[in-house]
Image (cartoon, rainbow, N blue to C red):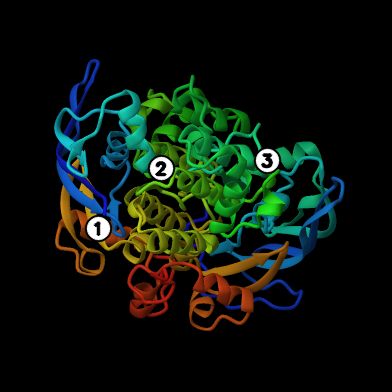
């Protein structure tokens, strides 16, 4: 059982000529193995700052992040060991894979850096990981990213994240660049992996519909502050905070739309 | 100006080859091939009638041909794309029928933007970073309305900035000084400048967050009611399209597999692929499209 505590974190950026900007204001949550927390909010709400702090690309101005009770090491071997426990899946599968390298290379690299398996077993481990994300290892292993579809690329990115056998996964808009019709497949894959490997997942998104179906608990961020939190269905179906209500009202909702319109169309209101 | 033209709401499925009375654009047997090795048939024998004042949604997955079709009907495609069959007729408000494929380069240049304008994918990044937005809007009139004086052009730009609610005080702003939503409004102002009869919008809100997206959609809808233009709205975001479109064309492998009112598509989809698409997105409040957890 792994527990990540994000404890009363505040992050203030100083901007030349503009004074200080509070990107995160006293944000706390606890993520444990097998649990998914959805983090929703619009651009600039602080979602990505949380991801940067979790990966130690930024340090908090105040507050602390702890993994199993231990503060995150700032540098060196300790930081590498921490990052082996927590991996990222990024938004853009076109930008997050290196066009020069084969799929094999992308997955081999973390195996080697984190010394996950002996060299002799590398090939079979790469294949195992590709099969794990429902890719046909034989047909993709020697290809380069541009030869794969967007959905396949995102599966490779997930396999790469799993290579170090992390306990926690931070997925920052993992499906927003993909066609609506294949998003569900990727989310279902993440849900399967989470169940089978007991991963804790932080799902960062501005899409309320997927957040609702994919998360156990949802935190709504507005201007760096958590304005609402609770079980996914409560937050999305019965939002209490005005900001959450505004997000909900702005999100496309055909079920509601066609239940209430009487033929007049194109109102978009 | 097109005030007063009745928008053709919910005009039903158009069948056969006789254009309806209120038709703005008739596309017949239209095909586009990318002449590479092997050739790719991107649009195959598409026929459709676009009604005056309607929002027609064009939906489908990446690579289905929706963008190629929308660009092709305005002859915006470059080699290796080749239009291999079909005709496109624009039924001008003046009563004249314009055969788009027969226009010479000069006439084509006048036709574009004057009759049909475009809001491009990633429009927020298609503004010139080193010119003020006022100057960029001014350019449209300078090129297409050479008779206007600079004072008239300035007044027209100010009016446009007010119409899209960017505000005239932004005349001297550079694109980087505006938010993504504001830049998108400037692009809509530019598309609106010559009061075209058709606006083609290619994923105009995809890069924006939901609150800004909703504002822009409301504005497009209000402008459409005010000015009476038709919209071809291209996106893979079917939930969004269902709410804003009068009719929706579902495309797959270069063909339109189903074309019906948004209500029909939602309540009574006929094609198996349409049903698959409808099942494939998680619902905000409904129970279908669940992640299997």
Q: Nearer the viewer, mark 2 or mark 1?
A: 2
Residue occupying the point 49% across, 32% down:
A113
Give the distance between the C-alpha atoms of the residues marked 2 and 1, in whole angstroms.
19 Å
Would you call the spot at circle 3 few (<14 residues within 10 Å), some (14-19), or many (20 or more)? some
Give the side of residue B58 with respect to residue B219, left or right: right
Residue occupying the point 51% across, 28% down:
B136
Determine contact: label 2, label 1, CB under 8 Å.
no
> Which residue is at the front of the view, B274 or A67?
A67
> Which residue is at the front of the view, B103 or B39?
B39
Regarding mark 1 in the picture, which secondary structure is present there?
strand
Q: Position of residue A91 (x, y in %)?
A: 46, 44
The dot on residue A144 is 3
Which chain letter goes with mark 3?
A
The dot on residue B230 is none
Q: Position of residue B208 (x, y in %)?
A: 40, 46
Which chain letter goes with mark 2?
A
Q: Quick one: which residue is furthest to the top in this view?
A: A16
Regarding mark 2 in the picture, which secondary structure is present there?
strand
Q: Is residue B224 visible?
A: yes
> Which residue is at the front of the view, B6 or A223?
A223
Q: Is residue A126 above or below residue A218?
A: above
Q: Is residue B260 above or below residue B252?
A: below
Q: Position of residue B192 (x, y in %)?
A: 50, 44
Residue at which label 1 appears = A218
Give the side of residue B111 with respect to residue A151, left or right: right
Give the distance between the C-alpha atoms of the residues marked 3 and 1, in whole angstroms.
36 Å
Q: Nearer the viewer, mark 3 or mark 1?
A: 3
Residue at which label 2 appears = A88
Would you call the spot at circle 1 few (<14 residues within 10 Å), some (14-19), or many (20 or more)? many
Give the side of residue B144 with respect to residue B195, left or right: right
Q: Is residue B169 visible?
A: no
């Amino acid at each position: 059982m792994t527990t990540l505590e994000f404890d009363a974190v505040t992050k203030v950026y100083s901007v030349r000529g503009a004074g200080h900007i509070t990107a995160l204001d006293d944000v706390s949550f606890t993520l444990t193995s097998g649990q998914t927390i959805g983090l929703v909010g619009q651009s600039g709400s602080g979602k990505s700052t949380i991801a940067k702090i979790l990966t130690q690309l930024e340090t908090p101005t105040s507050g602390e992040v702890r993994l199993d009770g231990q503060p995150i090491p700032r540098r060196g071997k300790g930081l590498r060991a921490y990052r082996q426990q927590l991996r990222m899946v990024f938004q853009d599968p076109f930008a997050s894979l290196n066009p020069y390298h084969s799929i094999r290379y992308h997955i081999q690299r973390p195996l080697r850096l984190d010394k996950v398996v002996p060299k002799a077993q590398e090939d079979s481990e790469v294949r195992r990981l590709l099969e794990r994300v429902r890719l046909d290892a034989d047909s993709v292993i020697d290809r380069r990213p541009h030869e794969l579809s967007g959905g396949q690329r995102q599966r490779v990115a997930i396999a790469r994240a799993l290579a170090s056998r992390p306990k926690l996964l931070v997925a920052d808009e993992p499906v927003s660049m993909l066609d609506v019709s294949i998003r569900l497949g990727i989310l279902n894959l993440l849900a399967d992996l989470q169940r089978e490997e007991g991963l804790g997942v932080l799902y960062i998104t501005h899409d309320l519909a997927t957040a609702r179906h994919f998360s156990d608990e949802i935190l709504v961020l507005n201007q760096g502050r958590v304005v609402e939190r609770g079980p996914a269905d409560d937050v999305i179906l019965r939002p209490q905070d005005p900001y959450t209500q505004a997000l909900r009202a702005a999100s496309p909702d055909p079920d509601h739309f066609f239940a209430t319109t009487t033929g007049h169309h194109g109102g978009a209101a | 100006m097109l005030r007063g033209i009745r928008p053709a709401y919910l005009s039903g499925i158009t069948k056969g080859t006789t254009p309806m009375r209120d038709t703005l654009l008739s596309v017949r047997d239209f095909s586009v091939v990318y002449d590479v090795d092997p050739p790719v048939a991107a649009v195959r024998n598409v026929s459709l009638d676009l009604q005056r004042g309607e929002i027609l949604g064009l939906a489908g997955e990446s690579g289905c041909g929706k963008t190629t079709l929308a660009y092709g009907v305005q002859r915006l495609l470059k080699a290796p794309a080749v239009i291999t069959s079909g005709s496109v007729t624009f039924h001008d408000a003046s009563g004249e029928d314009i055969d788009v494929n027969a226009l010479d380069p000069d006439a084509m240049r006048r036709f574009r933007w004057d009759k049909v304008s475009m809001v491009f994918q990633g429009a927020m990044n298609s503004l010139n970073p080193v010119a003020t937005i006022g100057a960029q809007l001014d350019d449209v009139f300078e090129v297409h309305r050479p008779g206007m004086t600079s004072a008239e052009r300035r007044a027209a730009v100010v009016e446009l900035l007010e119409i899209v609610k960017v505000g005239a005080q932004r005349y001297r702003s550079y694109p980087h000084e505006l938010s993504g939503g504001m830049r998108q409004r400037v692009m809509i102002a530019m598309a609106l400048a010559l009061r075209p009869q058709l606006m083609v919008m290619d994923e105009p809100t995809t890069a924006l967050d939901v609150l800004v997206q909703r504002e822009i959609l409301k504005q497009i809808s209000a402008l459409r009611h005010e000015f009476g233009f038709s919209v071809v709205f291209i996106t893979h975001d079917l939930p969004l399209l269902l709410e804003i479109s009068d009719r929706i064309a579902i495309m797959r492998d270069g063909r339109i597999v189903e074309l019906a009112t948004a209500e029909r598509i939602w309540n009574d989809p006929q094609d198996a692929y349409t049903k698959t698409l409808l099942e494939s997105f998680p619902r905000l409040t409904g129970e279908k499209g669940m992640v299997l957890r």
